[in-house]
Image: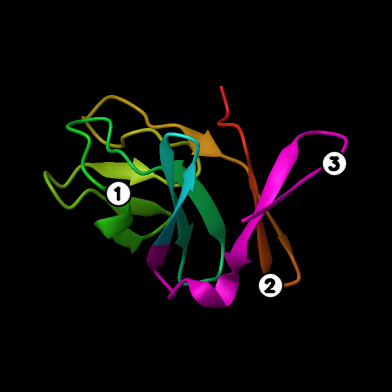
Amino acid sequence: MTAHTDTRAAYAIVGTIDDIPAQGARCVTMGETRVAVFRTADDRIFALEDRCPHRGGPLSQGIVHDGCVTCPLHNWVISLQSGRATGADDGATCTFDVRLEGRTIHLAMRAND
């Protein structure tokens, strides 16, 4: 991981879009936080803390579909955009900003509030 800064925030290069299978995830570690970087079927990239708000399940091992990921432990569905649980479930996991420059993924080094 290579870190750099711009005028808004510090970002780290965490790989390329080709490192992540379509509808899959790749994990990186930011300090003590494990971050799952997701790639959707239409090549959008999102990053969430790799922890379901329900019981801490590894979201990186979930199923990516329709802009969401389904936790592999108890099937909670989490929005990749907001990190919030959908449907009747309540809770959220931290999100991280990502940027694509060409095919290179830049991950914000701080979670969104």
For the residues labelled 2 and 3, the Cα–Cα distance comes to: 19 Å
Q: Which residue is mark 2?
A: 103
Q: Are marks 1 and 2 in contact (CB under 8 Å)?
A: no
Give percent across and percent down for residue 97: 62, 42
- Indicate the amino acid at tag 3: Asp
Q: Residues within 10 Å of mark 1 (few under 14, many from 20)?
A: many
Is residue 48 positioned above or below 37 on the image? above
Q: Which residue is mark 1?
A: 59
- Indicate the amino acid at tag 1: Leu
Q: Residue at x 12, y 47 (%)?
A: 73
Is residue 29 positioned above or below 33 on the image? below
The answer to which of marks 3 and 1 sits earlier in the sequence is 3
Element type where label 1 sits in the image? helix
Query: Which stretch did the figure color magenta?
Result: 1-25
Q: Which residue is mark 3?
A: 6
Q: Nearer the viewer, residue 104 or 74?
A: 104
Q: Residues within 10 Å of mark 2 (few under 14, many from 20)?
A: few
- Indicate the amino acid at tag 2: Arg
Circle nearer the viewer, 2 or 3 = 3
Q: Residue at x 45, y 43 (%)?
A: 48
Q: Is residue 70 magenta?
A: no
112 sits left or right of 79 in the view: right
Residue 110: quarter of image: top right
Element type where label 3 sits in the image? loop
Q: Is residue 62 visible from the viewing direction of this image?
A: no
Is residue 104 positioned above or below 94 on the image? below
The answer to which of marks 2 and 3 sits earlier in the sequence is 3
For the residues labelled 3 and 1, the Cα–Cα distance comes to: 29 Å
